[in-house]
Amino acid sequence: MAFATEYTTDKIRNVVVLGHGGAGKTSLIDALCYTAGSSRRKGDVGEGTALTMYTPEEASHGISLQCTPAFCEYSGAKINLLDTPGFMDFVGETLAAIRVADSAVIVVSATSGVEVGTETVWQYAEDRGVPRFFFVSMMDKDHASFERVYQDIKARLTQKVVPVEIPIGEGPDFRGIINLFSERAHIYKAGTEKGEYDEVDVPEELQAKFEEWETELQETLATTDEALLDRYLEEGKITREEAIEAMHKGVASGDIVPLFCGSSEHSYGMQALLKGLVDLCPSPAEAGGETAQRAGMEEEVHLSASDDETFSALIYKTASEPRIGELSYFRVMSGSVSNGQEVQNGESGGIEKLNHLSIPMGKDRFEVAKLHAGDLGVVAKLKNAHTNDTLCDMSRAVILEKIDFPKPEIAMAIRGEGRGDEDKLGVVLPKLHEEDPTFLAEFDPDLHQTIIRGMGELHLAVQMERMKRKYGVAVTMEQPKIGYRETITKEAEGQGRHKKQSGGRGQFGDCWIRLRPRPAGAGYEFVSAIKGGVIPTKFVPSVDKGIQEAADRGVLAGFKCVDFEAQCYDGSYHAVDSSDIAFKLAGSTAFRNVAAKCRPVILEPIIEVTVTTPDDYLGDIMSDINQRRGKVLGMEPTAGRTTVKALVPEAELYKYSTSLRAITQGRAHHSRSFSGYEAVPEQEVPKVIAASKEAAAAS
């Protein structure tokens, strides 16, 4: 493939492609690259040959699962395109792509219109302040309607949307577009591979419709500039060059969101969109630069997207593949970088050498001699640099703003299918986290389980599939245990006595203890009140140890007993038979005898859940929280959405993110944090005890 080896900053366009799952993002990128000539063949999502959807997991599930970069060259510019997943389980990949993009194309299906995922990614781009475009895809499909999608966008997303082209025909009759800038019609040639067309006058039967849409475009653009508005009012028209310049400025400021349309399957509309991206998208130099922090200092510095600036780059994605090793995808935020150059990790201070500097194209990479400010690159086998790390010039260490990855919403337990699998988990799971920061894993010593956390059930399932493919580690997923505790609620006292005689030296230990409840979270405390040497001082710590070991095994259901005081106040010993082990066993016996009289209760972990939902679903959310034994702490309404805070037992939150999506059609999200422990209601206690006994028997 022939391509220019270097593109200067003013010739670069960084575009993230966003949308609901199935809207046609991957197909659009494939068609753009094929039309522009950077890809030799046109792939197909259904056949698993799409340019930016190539992993075995993506082929298996039939959807994009990661942020994948590609590029095409058009009209002297390099357009970096970032494909993103439409399924919100993989939102971390989407947020990473938005972080390194200067503009976004939001793909909306001509048949489905604005969907849940469309609303979500629109808000992500809005929060980031990224200039946006809309592309109405699948104009050739049955029931396609450009007008319906346009009105849907205006009603549900933004009033700033402005069509820059309108379709000629819809559904199977879709055969061309009318460009509102050039005032010409593009009639596509059926059977051509790259959307070739004949440029003709606007068909007479569409003249009235064209004039209506053109007037709307002209009026919108005229209001962006006072001088332009005066000219429009005087002359009734602004020129094509003035219109494009005004649109370019309006896009960059976020005041205008252009609307394109086409069919990726037939490559209809691709050349018009390519031209629009070159003419209307801001270059990295126009995007405003970056604010970074000097490493180890509070000082902030502004970095412009210019080769004259010192080098800095953000690693936005880390991938690992067999036989290749770790790949680090980055955006050059400032300065330039050459193949083989040594750079510094701004945070750790480590030195990295950028060998085989390349530009990414789906699963392929093309080595280059140099990358300029604003461009996207990839290198293999960095020693110790991962996602969200800053690479910078050794003369000025800086740390760029990190990608704000969301916290996991779901947890599952895993166990290796074989002994070898179990042994490898501690090594392999951190590697998966390095590739995907929204995936977390830890071994919980209290539960004796390895817990993995992620954004949803599919997210975790895919990560386990990747682990098996890349590292040969197979696991079984299961429901995590709940970290119940036990405690006592009244004071009691009693004896623990251990006596054993089996010939020769025997064992003897005798202690009297008093147990008292302590406040929640106060923990365990041991007090020695022995007087007169009834128990030798050297054996008292053994009583303490025995009490703690018995408390770890619980009173009612085998859960650790917490928040109590144990006072040892009396006892007796044998000059020959007493020993540390005897008094430890006596202490354990004493705890079991006394704790049963202290009105023990089971405590369950309580989670503070924060749910943000559209107001339409508020009633259903509240009802669901009540069914989960939750207590609402408060509600905060904000612009059509309400944030609900509630305390919910952890036992009631298994797969809550999945249920929440079902209740709200995917429009709500939640976060959670540990709040504390509360006593399990009496009616729930038998269930907890039965489940604990069943789990103990199974193990």
Image (cartoon, rainbow, N blue to C red):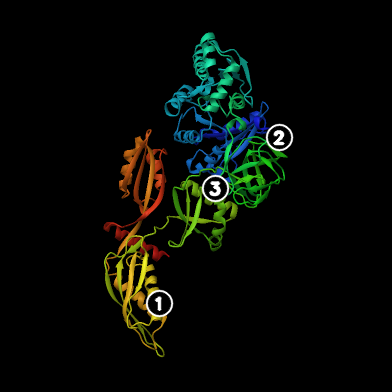
**How far apart are the alpha carbons under marks 1 and 2?**
74 Å
* Quadrant showing the C terminus: bottom left
Q: Which residue is mark 1?
A: 542
Q: Nearer the viewer, mark 3 or mark 2?
A: 2
Residue 175 seen from this side: no
Which labelled disc corresponds to residue 436?
3
**How far apart are the alpha carbons under marks 3 and 2?**
30 Å
Name which residue lies at 40% across and 73% down.
Answer: 545
Picture coordinates of residue 339, whole percent (x, y): 72, 43
How many marks do you count on the picture? 3
Which labelled disc corresponds to residue 243?
none
Q: Quadrant of residue 613?
A: top left
- Type of the residue with mark 1: Ser
Q: Nearer the viewer, mark 1 or mark 2?
A: 1
User: How busy is the neighbourhood of tag 1: few (under 14 within 10 Å), some, or many (20 plus)?
Assistant: many
- Tag 2's secondary structure? loop
* Quadrant showing the N terminus: top right
Q: Earlier in the sequence, mark 3 or mark 2?
A: 2
> Looking at this rendering, what residue extends furthest in the top direction?
234
Q: Are marks 1 and 2 in contact (CB under 8 Å)?
A: no
Picture coordinates of residue 647, whole percent (x, y): 34, 49
